[in-house]
Image (tube, rainbow, N blue to C red):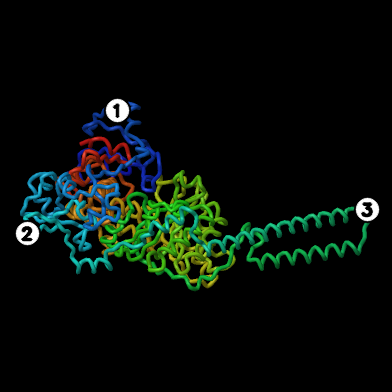
């Protein structure tokens, strides 16, 4: 568009405030990376802007620019609690078995007297029809019925008297002596239905976590497999020693040939022995399941009983750090996503019984196909993690697949040999994947890759063709492969290389045809931001589907667009409905007490830190929108649309207050990127 910097979204003139693009953070944040400044899409530093955004701009000095760039590292989000807390058992309307010895308060009347007033969860229509801002909507008239999202979904609220929407599920009664008694309401019919349709699964209890933490958890499959590897390594060492002896014998024989004394018979005998030993050596290698040119064994395994993944044409929400939690996945499910995967968890943390890590495997019943992603660097952590996942979550359909992260680029993961470091260690990766297949039984193992570690050195093709074998010498029995079209070094500085993705898919398909193997689903990943992008990728690049990450963070409704094959000019009201859903899903997961509400508020703000980047397609001159285009400064078609586009983190908190009530003074949301902590520039 004329007059606009390259890579700028083509916003119609009537909505423009300035052609200067809004500072957009480095998208490595989507993968949880540290560092990284603000860069424009053409690689140059973000342009300096003045407070008014016009042409007569004042250039910031170095200190000002540095203060606005990069990430707010080491963010800490402390829990916000009630000033006067109460025993959870008493709050739930039951008796505490510890009685007077309990360290928590048991005085319910004093707690209720000191408790902040109840909140009100408005509908979007009620919110928009209010004459003033969000604060007024929190003043609850007696005629306005209260709503507790947890009670409405489950028929009871386990937070009881601690719930900030208590009036929705409390019953008052007067006794004969005139005293008032309070009791919690339970809707038995709704409770019974919710036990099937709404109750989260994959709760790994404290007992299991303690066994893991104290290293008393039993891993029979892992132990047997690791013994196999040790024995195979021992055999390989013996074979290697035999090779050295044969080479030494061959060297001595050649020296004997060059000597002045030639003894015919012994020489012929020596040659025969050498050939026999070489033949025996290769026979032993083949019997052990080794290839003479492979530096590590591939232990054979049967894959006939593995669940086959039929994912062609489906939509797949990428595992996303921080934002991709259960409430956000539920939101994407409401927009039509088919496959979801939990946030990446570290194998070592799972095995140490980390409560936080095990919370990542929780699944909502609405998630039709759900997987767990883990990161690790060797078989002795990945295999036991797979075994405990199968034992604790697999028996009742809690997980449909386990994904191994072979693409995470962040230093914290890469330097331990995990994530994208595994791209350069195929032998080690193969050992781990084969062992995981053994440990998981019928549950498939999938992998997510990048094209390579360094630019100009794509290695994914060789790794993928090796991975899809059906249990032969070089096959790892992979159930699905996702390939992100960027190297680890590249991060998000260039567009994804979809031509290389097609090259890898074609190579795998050719190998499968040669070996008469059933096709393994292959998904592409990178820059998908519209229905057009999705269906073009499937048609042009031969993938079975597209995994969507940043596109879903910025516009979760992308899955509706793909299903309905349309570009949705979603209204500000419809977008606010999605924000409300996310708030309700957060309360259901994190809780409706003071602590849960502000944990929900924090993750709602994290989600808004991506959603503000959406430019409504009704404001664009050219479609489809592109994910790497940066928005100039624009105004929306109404006040709400402008608010939802604000890059100022204070406005994200303001949006959260519409549904979660005023943020307490103790609540502080520190945005991941420093630029979002500054006031909006017009």
Q: Quadrant of the N terminus?
A: top left
Disc 2 + disc 1, Cβ < 8 Å: no
Which-is-in-front pick, marks 2 and 1? 2
Q: Element under label 3?
A: loop
The residue drawn where x is 37% and y is 50% is 321
Q: Residues within 10 Å of mark 2 (few under 14, many from 20)?
A: few
Among numbered discs 1 and 3, the one appearing first in the sequence: 1
Q: Is residue 461 left or right of residue 631?
A: right
The foreground one among 366 and 651 is: 366
The foreground one among 168 and 30 is: 168
Q: Position of residue 471 (x, y in %)?
A: 55, 68
Residue 176 circle label = 2
Q: Element under label 1?
A: loop
Q: Is residue 233 left or right of residue 529?
A: right
Q: Position of residue 206 (x, y in %)?
A: 39, 56
Among numbered discs 2 and 1, the one appearing first in the sequence: 1
The residue drawn where x is 22% and y is 66% is 191
In the rendered image, which residue does mark 1 sit on? Answer: 59
| Residue 570 shows up from this direction | no
The foreground one among 201 and 399 is: 201
Q: Quadrant of the C terminus?
A: top left
Q: Is residue 94 left or right of residue 223?
A: left
Q: Element under label 2?
A: loop
Q: Position of residue 672 (x, y in %)?
A: 33, 41
Is residue 296 positioned above or below 492 on the image? below
The residue drawn where x is 86% and y is 65% is 269
Q: Position of residue 359 (x, y in %)?
A: 36, 55
Disc 1 + disc 3, Cβ < 8 Å: no
Is residue 343 positioned above or below 228 on the image? above
In the rendered image, which residue does mark 3 sit on? Answer: 260
């Amino acid at each position: 568009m004329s007059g606009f910097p390259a890579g700028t979204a083509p916003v119609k003139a009537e909505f423009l405030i300035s052609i200067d693009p809004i500072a957009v953070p480095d998208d490595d944040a989507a993968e949880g990376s540290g560092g990284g400044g603000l860069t424009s899409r053409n690689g140059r530093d973000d342009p300096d802007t003045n407070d008014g955004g016009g042409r007569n701009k004042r250039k910031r000095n170095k200190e000002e620019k540095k203060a606005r760039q990069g990430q707010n590292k080491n963010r800490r989000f402390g829990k916000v609690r009630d000033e006067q807390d109460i025993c959870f058992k008493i709050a739930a309307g039951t008796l505490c078995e510890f009685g007077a010895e309990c360290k928590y308060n048991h005085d319910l009347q004093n707690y209720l007297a000191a408790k902040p007033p109840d909140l009100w969860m408005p509908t979007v229509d009620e919110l928009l029809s209010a004459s003033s801002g969000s604060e007024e909507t929190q003043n609850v008239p007696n005629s306005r019925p209260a709503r507790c999202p947890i009670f409405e979904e489950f028929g009871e609220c386990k937070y009881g008297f601690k719930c900030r929407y208590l009036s929705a599920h409390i019953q008052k009664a007067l006794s004969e002596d005139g005293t008032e008694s309070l009791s919690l309401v339970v809707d038995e019919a709704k409770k019974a239905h919710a036990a099937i349709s709404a109750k989260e699964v994959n709760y790994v209890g404290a007992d299991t976590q303690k066994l893991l933490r104290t290293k008393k958890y039993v891993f029979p499959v892992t132990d047997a497999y690791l013994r196999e590897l040790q024995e195979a390594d021992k055999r390989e060492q013996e074979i290697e020693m035999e090779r050295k002896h044969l080479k030494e014998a061959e060297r001595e024989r050649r020296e004997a040939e060059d000597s002045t004394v030639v003894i015919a018979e012994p020489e012929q005998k020596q040659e025969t022995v050498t050939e026999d030993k070489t033949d025996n050596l290769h026979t032993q290698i083949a019997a052990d399941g080794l290839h003479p040119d492979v530096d590590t064994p591939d232990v054979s395994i049967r894959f006939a009983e593995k669940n086959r993944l039929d994912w062609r044409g489906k939509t797949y929400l990428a595992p996303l750090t921080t934002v991709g939690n259960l409430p956000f996945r539920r939101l994407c499910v409401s927009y039509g996503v088919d496959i979801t995967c939990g946030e990446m968890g570290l194998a070592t943390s799972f095995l140490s019984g980390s409560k936080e890590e095990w919370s990542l495997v929780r699944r909502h019943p609405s998630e039709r196909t759900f997987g767990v992603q883990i990161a690790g660097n060797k078989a002795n952590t990945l295999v036991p993690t797979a075994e405990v996942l199968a034992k604790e979550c697999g028996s009742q359909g809690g997980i449909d697949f386990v994904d191994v992260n072979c693409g995470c680029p962040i230093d914290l993961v890469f330097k331990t040999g995990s994530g994208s470091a595994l791209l350069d260690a195929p032998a080690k990766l193969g050992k781990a994947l084969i062992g995981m297949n053994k440990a998981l039984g019928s549950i498939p193992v999938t992998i997510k890759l990048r094209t390579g570690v360094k630019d100009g050195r794509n290695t994914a093709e060789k790794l993928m063709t090796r991975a899809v074998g059906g249990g032969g010498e070089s096959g790892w029995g992979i159930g699905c492969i996702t390939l992100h079209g960027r190297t680890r070094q590249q991060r998000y500085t260039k567009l994804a290389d979809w031509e290389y993705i097609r090259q890898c898919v074609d190579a795998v398909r050719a190998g499968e045809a040669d070996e008469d193997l059933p096709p393994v689903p292959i998904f592409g990943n990178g820059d998908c931001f519209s229905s057009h992008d999705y269906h073009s990728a499937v048609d042009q690049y031969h993938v079975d589907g597209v995994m969507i990450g940043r596109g879903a963070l910025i516009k979760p409704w992308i899955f509706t667009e793909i299903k309905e094959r349309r570009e949705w000019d979603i209204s500000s009201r419809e977008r606010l409905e999605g924000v409300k859903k996310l708030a309700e899903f957060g309360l259901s997961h994190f809780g409706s007490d003071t602590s849960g509400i502000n944990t929900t508020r924090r993750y709602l703000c994290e989600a808004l830190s991506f959603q503000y980047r959406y430019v409504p397609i009704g404001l664009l001159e050219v479609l489809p929108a592109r994910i790497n285009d940066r928005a100039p400064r624009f105004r929306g078609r109404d006040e709400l649309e402008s608010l939802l586009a604000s890059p100022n983190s204070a406005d994200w908190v303001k949006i959260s207050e519409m549904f979660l009530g005023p943020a307490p003074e103790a609540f502080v949301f520190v945005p991941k990127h420093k630029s979002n902590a500054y006031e909006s520039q017009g």
